[in-house]
Amino acid sequence: MDRRWPVRLILERAGAPKFTTLQSGGISGPYLADQALHATTLLGSAIMLVRL
């Protein structure tokens, strides 16, 4: 996820291609999406560990 192309691909497939070019106040859309994907991945990992 730390590479730009997976985040861009996910955003385009999700129907938010304009978010890939968002620049506002020094924070970009891909950065925000990347951080959200990290949090989602960690949540999924935690849920899988609890179910073991």
Image (spheres, helix red, strand yellow):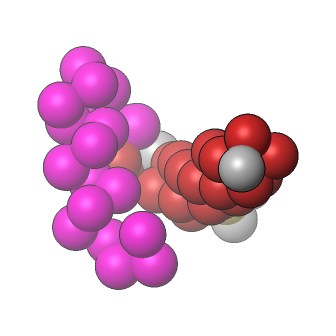
Q: Position of residue 2 (x, y in %)?
A: 45, 78
Residue 8 magenta-drawn? yes
Q: Who's the residue at 20% across and 36% down the image?
A: 12
In the displayed orientation, state which residue is furthest to the front.
Answer: 52
Q: Is residue 2 above or below residue 11?
A: below
Residue 5 magenta-drawn? yes
Quadrant position of residue 7: bottom left
* Majority secondary structure in the magenta region: helix
Q: Who's the residue at 42% across and 69% down the image?
A: 1
Instruction: Give the magenta range.
Output: 1-19
How many numbered marks have been drawn onto this rendered protein structure? 0
In the displayed orientation, state which residue is furthest to the top.
Answer: 15
Quadrant position of residue 28: bottom right
Q: Is residue 6 above or below residue 4?
A: above
Left or right: residue 24 compared with residue 29? right
Left or right: residue 27 compared with residue 22? right
Q: Who's the residue at 28% across and 25% down the image?
A: 14
**Viewer-proximal residue among 16 and 51:** 51
**Viewer-proximal residue among 34 and 48:** 48
